[in-house]
Image (cartoon, coloured by chain):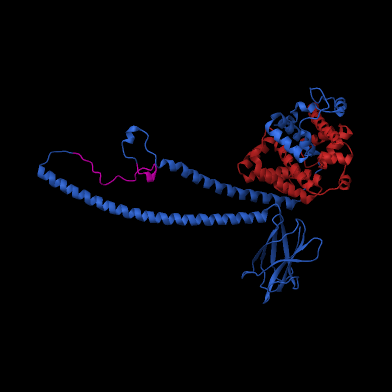
Chain colours: A red, B blue
Amino acid sequence: MNPSRQDPAYTTRPAIATPSDDSSLVRRIAGGDESALAALYDSWAQPVYSVVAHLLRDADGAEDVVEETFWQIWQRASSYDASRGTVRTWILTIARSRALDRLRSRKRNREDIAADLSVLRDPAPDPSQDVEGNERRQLVHAALQELPEDQRRALDLAYFRGLSQSEIAELLGEPLGTIKTRTRLGMQKLRDKLIGLRESRA
Amino acid sequence: MSDDNELNDKHPQDANAGDDAANDRSVSGHPVSPTPLNDAEPAFDVAGAALGALTPQEEADLYAAASVDPAVSADLAAMEAVVAELARLAPMQQMNRGRSAGIRSRLVARAAATNVGRRATSSEATAESTQQVERPARPARPASSSAARHHAPPPSHGNAQPRHTPLHVIPFEPRRRLPMGRIFGGLALAAAVVIAAFGIYNWRNRSQTESARTASALHDSSLEVQVAQLRISLAQKDSLISALTGMHTRVIDLMSYADASPMARMFWDQKKQMFIMYASNVKQPARGKVYQVWLIARGTTTPVSVGTFMPDSTGSAVVASKHPMEPGSLRRVAVTEEPDGGMPTPTGPVMFAGVGK
């Protein structure tokens, strides 16, 4: 038996879970099945927590965001559109949006942001994740490393520090248009690289 | 949709880029778009939106566009998938075991509570719709011309069939000719029997109908009272569940300072700035004394009184009160024994104390 099924609090993605499992759970949630909400929580609470805790640097706040995220999932499951993306993307988009709301409600000054900057670290293998998850993690890291430094930095500040493009422009002393361009190009290339790397490995 | 496919949606606006784009094309080796590059900014910054890096106005404009333009929507979805891929780089951070289990329990309890609400609303709606369906049937008449020539069933019963065959309808079947005297005599006797039977039937029927009406009225009235009571009870339970399990609620356990084993637990809804404290095994205070609840905020040592209480005969007490306090600022909760009416500052022994989380 997968340990994650034994202890919901320490769950990671069960090895047997698939996107279709997740879609099925979301459909059941939309139909008012609270046990499906519990099952989705067991699968996704830990990954969601890791993302928002890294963004917020605040364990209590991250737990609140996890709860808000799954509550929003319960309330809006019927609006999930599988044609627009996977359940994983949907959940993480909701979680990140909630985390950004919380982050931006705090008053951060320039010094706080500067002190909080960190370069992306090498992704150490996560023993709790499945092999595919670790492989994809390495793949994303490799794709990011291939980006020009200024674009990688713009994405780092936007994604991992939750800064708006205006804040990034102010922090780096660059025109807003330049930051927008770097962000856009970085994201486009990241997408292309992820597709390319995946195809080459396949 | 697979994760891979999520990334494959492209949109012509990907091509819009400045000098950076020209450099990037040579670096990546993957053309960003088949359309030529130019310096113009795209109409909508989907990458910025997916990263949550736009201004509120820009974001509102983009989502409005995405709701009507499938191309913008697809482009946004593809960028959201890229952002979701970046999530893999966040280092693993373990959730606290107990708190995660608590969040899970609260979510399921709240979901179940909303289900109760949904079911109640649904059953009410069903009952109402049933009534609405039945109402037009009451005055309806048979549609066919042959049926229209006959009497319609009593409208008060809708489409229900008559429950019994009326007694005053006697089948007439002449079998043989009889003398006129016997015929008239027989008819008179038959008429008397019919009238008598009809009278008895009518009297019994009216009596039964009246009784049934009275019983039905009493039953309806009783049901209405029960439904009203259940609604009130349900609303109270929903409110209680919300107060005890809401995401803004913090739970504070208060430990006893006395020899007995009283205990108390406080549920503090930070958003509503409301608390409910349950206490049990609390001994009766000394004569002329009451228990007084104090809150101490962070950054201060001055307790603020939020009320007094007396335990009931079983030693239980429930205290509910509202008190403005910033979320996360509750440092300590204490219960002291004070003179009846309470004191502006604590003077008596501390009976309970808890630490805000």
Seen from this angle, which residue lies furthest bottom?
Answer: B287
Query: Eyeballing the image, is B65 above or below A42?
Result: above
* Left or right, residue B61 beside residue A173: left
Residue B58's x, y, as percent? 76, 37
Q: Is residue B243 visible?
A: yes
Q: Does residue B292 lie above or below B37 as drawn?
A: below
Q: Quadrant of residue B258?
A: bottom right
Count every numbered label the image shows and give the total. 0
Which quarter of the rendering shows the N terminus of chain A? top right
Residue A124 in view, yes or no: no
Seen from the viewer's position, the closer of residues B92 and B21 is: B21
Q: Residue at x 51, y 44 (%)?
A: B126
* Residue A152 drawn at (x, y percent): 86, 35
Q: Position of residue A80 (x, y in %)?
A: 66, 37
- The segment highlighted magenta reads B153-173
- Is A12 left, or right, of B185 in this rendering? right
Q: Is residue A61 left or right of residue A40?
A: right
The answer to which of A98 and A48 lies nearer the viewer is A98
| Rendered residue at 43%/41% (across/down) | B136
Picture quadrant where residue B175 is located = top left
- Where in the figure is residue A127, as x and y percent of width and height? 80, 42
Q: Residue at x 69, y 70 (%)?
A: B291
